[in-house]
Image (cartoon, rainbow, N blue to C red):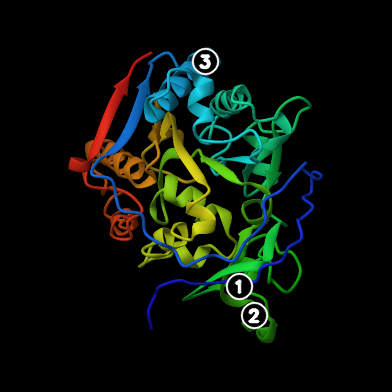
Amino acid sequence: MSRTLLVKVVFIGLFATMILGPFPSKAQSPAAPAPTPTPLPARSLVARAQSPDAIYDYKADAAIVYRLVGEAVMSVTGEGSVSAAWGSLVKPSDIVGIKICTNGAPLFSTRPEVVQAIADGLHQAGVPWENIVVFDRAEGLLKRAGFRSRPGSYRVLWTEGNYDPQVAISSPLAGQLIYGDLDFMGKNLPNLKEELQVNDQKKRLGNISNESHISKILTKVVTKVVNVPVLSDNFYCGLSGALFNMTVQNVDNWRRLVQPPESGDPSIPEIYADPRISEKVVITIMDGLVALYAGGPFGDANYAIQFGTIYASKDPVAIDALACKRLDKWRLDANMDSVSKTAKYVQTATALELGNSDPNKIEVRDLRP
C-alpha cells in the first residue's frame, strides 16, 4: 500500500467561533485543489542575522532582536523598510497567524521578543492588532512560554480542543488516539502509558485511527501564516524545524507520523504540500537565539547553545537544511549521530518540490546589524 497521504475535505461555508471570541473576518476552508507543484527556484535565499548580544542567560534583548528580525525580513523581501517588507507579504485585510513552537517552554521555545518584532512589523504594514494571531498546540505551553492575549496587541489561540472535524488527512499509518485527539473515545487519562493499559479492549480498538484532523486555526481563521520554528533537534524525527512546525504541530493523532522507522518521512513533507498549509505560509523565521542540538523537542540545558541568530527565508526546506547542517556540527563535536541521519524528510521535501535542500542551491546572506 502506498504511504502517500490521501487528503479528504468536506467544505462547509460557516466560520468557526474560537475559544477567545470572534474575529472581524475569518478564512474559509475551501476544498483543497489538486496541488500544482511550483518549479523550484535555481537558488533559495536564506538571510542569517546574528548578534552575540541578542541573548544572555536565556534572556533576549528586545531591541537587538527587533533589529535582527527586521534586517532579515528586509533582506529576504528586498524591501528598504520593515513596513514595506511585511507589506509585500501580507495585506491589511489578512488574518495573519504567527505559528510558534512552545514544546520546550519556557527556555527552549519561540521567544516572545521574536514574536513581538514580527507582530510590530505586521502592524506597521497596516494589519490591525486584532487580525494578528499567535498560536500553537497547547494552552499551557503557550502560557509557560510567556504568550497571553493582551488589549492592544496580538491574540493568542491554541489548537487543543479546536481540531476541524470536517478537515482530515489520512495515511496507511494507524495510531493510538489519546485524550485531546478529536476522535478519542473515553475519559482523560494522565498519560499514554495508562491509556494503553485500558482494559476495555473494544474501546482500545475504537481508539485506533489513521486520520489526523487539522487545526481550525489554519482551516477557519487565518489567511496567511508566518512560520516561527526553533533551532532544535527532535528525538522523534530528527529536526523540530520549519516543516515540522507547520505539520506535526498542527494536527491531532500526530504520534503515528513521527514514530520510527519512518520518523516523519514522507508524512511531514506530504502534509506540508497540502495547499491549505503550504499556500498560507508567506515566510519562515527561525528563532535561533537558543539552539538545542540534543534533548529536543522538550529541551535540556546541557545541550543548549545561546546562539543569537535569526534565520529568514521564503523556502522552508532551505532553512531546515541549514538547521540540520548547523546542528550536525555541534553533534559531531559531542560524538553524537547527525540529525540529518534521522531527518530524511528534508530531502524528501525537495523531491516533492517544496524547496531546495542542496547547499549548492542555497544562498546564505549573513547580516550583522
Which one is nearer the viewer's eye here, 108 or 257?
257
Q: CA distance from mark 2 to mark 3?
A: 49 Å
Q: Is residue 217 visible?
A: yes
Which mark is in front, 2 or 3?
3
Dot 2 crowding, Cα within 10 Å, few <14, some 14–19, many 20+: some
Residue at the limit of the structure toward the bottom, as seen here: 202
Please give the residue where the numbered disc 2 appears in the rendered image. Answer: 204
Q: Which residue is found at the position 38% from the left and 62% from the top?
A: 263
Q: Quadrant of the C terminus?
A: top left
Q: Which mark is residue 196?
A: 1
Residue 82: percent from the left, percent from the top?
A: 50, 20
Which one is nearer the viewer's eye here, 114 or 203?
114
Q: Mark 1 or 2 closer to N-term?
A: 1
Residue 359: percent from the left, percent from the top?
A: 21, 42
Q: Are marks 1 and 2 in contact (CB under 8 Å)?
A: yes
Q: CA distance from mark 1 to mark 2?
A: 8 Å
Q: Is residue 172 left or right of residue 26?
A: left
Label 1, secondary structure: give it: helix
Label 3, secondary structure: give it: loop
Q: Which residue is found at the position 44% from the left and 63% from the top?
A: 35
Please give the residue where the numbered disc 3 appears in the rendered image. Answer: 61
Residue at the limit of the structure toward the left, as seen here: 360
Which mark is in front, 1 or 2?
2
What's the amino acid at mark 3? Asp
Q: Is residue 305 visible?
A: no
Which image quadrant for residue 205? bottom right
Residue 174: percent from the left, percent from the top?
A: 51, 76
Residue 71: percent from the left, percent from the top?
A: 42, 20
